Image (spheres, rainbow, N blue to C red):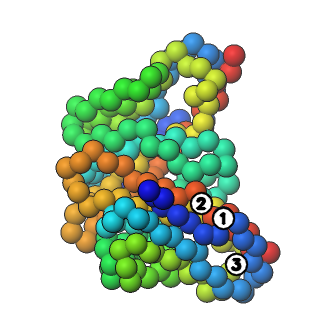
Amino acid sequence: NAGVTQTPKFRILKIGQSMTLQCAQDMNHNYMYWYRQDPGMGLKLIYYSVGAGITDKGEVPNGYNVSRSTTEDFPLRLELAAPSQTSVYFCASHPIDRILNTEAFFGQGTRLTVV
Amino acid sequence: ELKVEQNPLFLSMQEGKNYTIYCNYSTTSDRLYWYRQDPGKSLESLFVLLSNGAVKQEGRLMASLDTKARLSTLHITAAVHDLSATYFCAATNYGGSQGNLIFGKGTKLSVKP
């Protein structure tokens, strides 16, 4: 199993540019998440989704958009990149099963620099 | 609104010593997670705690959950240098339209010889 796959791994954007961070999981998980992690800091939830067609804002959604047209994919869109969006972005997924002793699985991260 | 607080945020330990990291959460949570993160890496799952009184152990790490106090602890026994990393706890409310998974700020652990 590939698990949670994020692309790209690294990206440099100029201020005002747009880009989409891709996230795909092959575990048929219903829940998916996007986090940002600033240097030396914890993870802040940007958006999450409880299933295809359903998304909701997390703690820091401003400047980002998401969509969830399939169970597998959960892309994160930055429309007008700003230096404050320089961060490492992590995507994660979790199965819906409330009984099994399972954790959220994380991708390897995308390191984004906005200059 | 679910909030998660960890303390301490920084912890410098000597090898062989014991210490505990604390994780408090503000509202009812279905489960509590502990993760480890090495510098420049992604998050690695350590423990999933599902019920009050749950205790799990792996090597020198032991995690426990008290849902009444909304408190989880990660106890480190006889620390070794390999345990140096940042440790995060996370809480969640799954079910229905809820699905947020909220992390604490992390505890950066440094184990010195």
Does residue A55 appear anywhere in the picture? yes
Task: Please report whichever mark, 3 or 2, sits nearer to the chain's N-terminal start.
Answer: 3
Mark 1 or mark 2: name the one nearer the start of the chain: 1
Residue drawn at x 52%, y 48% as measured from the top left: B43
Which residue is labeled 1 in the image? A9
Report the Cα–Cα distance between label 3 and label 2: 19 Å
Q: Chain of mark 2?
A: A
The image position of residue A16, as x and y in percent, is 72, 86
Judge from the rendering whether residue B17 lies leftward or rightward of residue A113; answer left or right. Answer: left
Residue furthest to the top in view is: B16
Task: Say what amino acid the circle numbered 2 marks.
Answer: Gly
Q: Which residue is mark 3?
A: A82
Is residue B11 visible in this depiction of the protein? no
Q: Are marks 1 and 3 on the same chain?
A: yes
Task: Please state, as top left, top right, bottom left or bottom right, where the N terminus of chain B lies in the image.
Answer: bottom left
Residue A109, disc = 2
Disc 1 is placed on an element classified as loop
Horizontal placement of A41 versus B96: left or right? right
- The crowding category of the residue bearing disc 1, from other C-alpha atoms within 10 Å (few below 14, some 14 to 19, many at least 20), is some
Task: Give B6 or A54, whichever is nearer the viewer.
Answer: A54
- Left or right of A1? Residue B38 is right
Nearest the viewer among B93 and A97 is A97
Residue lying at the far front of the rendered structure: A1
Q: Is residue B7 left or right of residue B54?
A: right
> In terms of depth relative to the viewer, which is nearer, A16 or A21?
A21
Cβ atoms at labels 1 and 2 below 8 Å apart: yes
Above or below, A15 against B89 in this view is below
Horizontal and vertical percent for residue A102?
32, 48
State yes or no: discs 3 and 2 in contact (Cβ < 8 Å). no
For the residues labelled 1 and 2, the Cα–Cα distance comes to 6 Å
Q: Earlier in the sequence, mark 1 or mark 3?
A: 1
